[in-house]
Amino acid sequence: MSISNAVITTLPQDFIFGVATSAYQIEGASKTDGRGPSIWDDFCHKPGNVANYDNGDFACDHYNRWKTDLDLIHGLNVDAYRFSFSWSRVLPKGTGQINEKGLAFYDRLIDGCLERQLQPFATLYHWDLPSSLQQLGGWTHRDTAYAFVEYAALMVTRFGDRLASISTFNEPWCSSMLGYLEGIHAPGLKDISLTMKSIHNQHLGHGLAVSQIKSINPSLPTGIVLNLQSIYPGSDSEEDQSAAIRHEAFNNGTFLDPLFKGSYPSAVTDSLGHHLPENWQDDLCNIHQPLDFWGLNFYTPTRVIHTCQRESAFPHTAQIFLDSEHECTDLGWEINAATLKELLIDVYKKYQLPPCYITENGACFNDEPTEGTVDDTRRVQYFEDHIAEIAKAHQAGVPIRGYFAWSLLDNFEWAEGYTMRFGLIHVDFHTQRRTIKRSGEWLANLAQSHHARKNSSLL
Ligand code: GCO
């Protein structure tokens, strides 16, 4: 199985390949060297929230194994490494007192990337809010946006000149919708009013941080990472078709519109505007900032139907799974690569967007090592199919600059704990032994062929 040359040659020559992780999912060392607690520590340590009562206390022990992990990334021949900073490692209470030992870890990590010719793509917020800020209301409180700006300024002042890019937020949809509405992620709340406030305050934190970052380091490429949904009606009925439109306004528009148009969709404000913080309109110009890039995290399409249950709030939709018609991953997520291309083309038609990176794409398959190898051919197929669709989107005019596979390592998969594996590298969580899977070897070959093509065209 090997991706055809035709696909590689359609990608732009300066296209980059990378791998992605996030702090809470791999670092471990949750109490080491002065790290403060985050909402994910608190959430995991309440029984019933996470499968098997798992937590990120040790995770992949990356805090101690960063050097050999960077060697593994280097061995994959990729150009870039996308990781996130742990806010409570550097500002244990979220604001105020700085933890130099925490900063020293990221100093080592970033220098380690540069020594291995890996471009560091950093993310400021991948869901692990310092607990002290949650005690004051978390993202429902405006002050959290200001604390985020202080944190962004600290990180960019220290590291900005060595980073290839910085993203403010990773998937604000998840930290608000899963954390404040569905209650399945930290902080585990189920309240539409708090959800709308948490969305708005994250947007505000993003916009203010972008201005701050640009004033400190105007040449640092700055963006945000979104998990837009590729939405389809669950049937041909008119009801389901309008459900899909409402679902899109709520789940994509609530994020894209303020960030890229400086407004919220009217369908959203008509139904839910009263839940936004007072005078929210005054923040829109601060939220709507020019960005150098945006990132798309994509895994699976979303199919929705109309629901008329009394208790359902706007957008009155429910997600359905067509698992009998499509192949699925071990998490039950439909595999449908063409929907990634459709989403990319569609979103560039609807919005004025800067160039994008696919900042995450990958699949959960729980293959285990046999005689020292992990034969995850289904993951290889998944990557091949999705990269082929990205190449088609590029040919259709979408400005795509790179692709990051999720994930470098099997890791702490949030509410699923360690039961669900997304890695290119298998981790035995008892021994911390790493085994490169067949998909890791495949990515190393792909990245190498891409380099060979770049180099030969330079001759
Ligand atoms: C995400 C997350 C990852 C998940 C991955 C698989 O941004 O959704 O960045 O943390 O592990 O998406 O569910």
Image: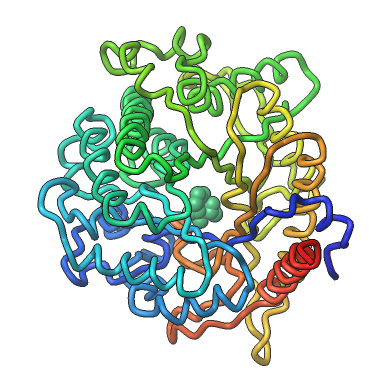
Whether residue 378 is visible, yes or no, is no
| Residue 380 higher or lower than 333, as above or below | below
> Residue 73: horizontal and vertical position, in percent?
55, 73
Q: In the picture, residue 8 is in which quadrant? A: bottom right
For image coordinates 62% across by 48% down, the residue present is 358
Which is nearer the eye, 16 or 364? Answer: 16
Whether residue 294 is visible, yes or no, is yes
Q: In the picture, residue 170 is in which quadrant? A: top left
Q: Is 106 situated left or right of 21 in this image?
A: left
Judging from the image, the colouring scheme is: rainbow
| Residue 110 higher or lower than 310, as above or below | below
| Residue 62 higher or lower than 384, as above or below | below
Q: Is 50 situated left or right of 225 in this image?
A: left
Q: Farthest residue to the bottom: give it.
A: 371
User: Quadrant where the N terminus lies?
Assistant: bottom right
Number of disc labels: 0
> Residue 333: horizontal and vertical position, in percent?
66, 50
Q: Farthest residue to the front: give it.
A: 459
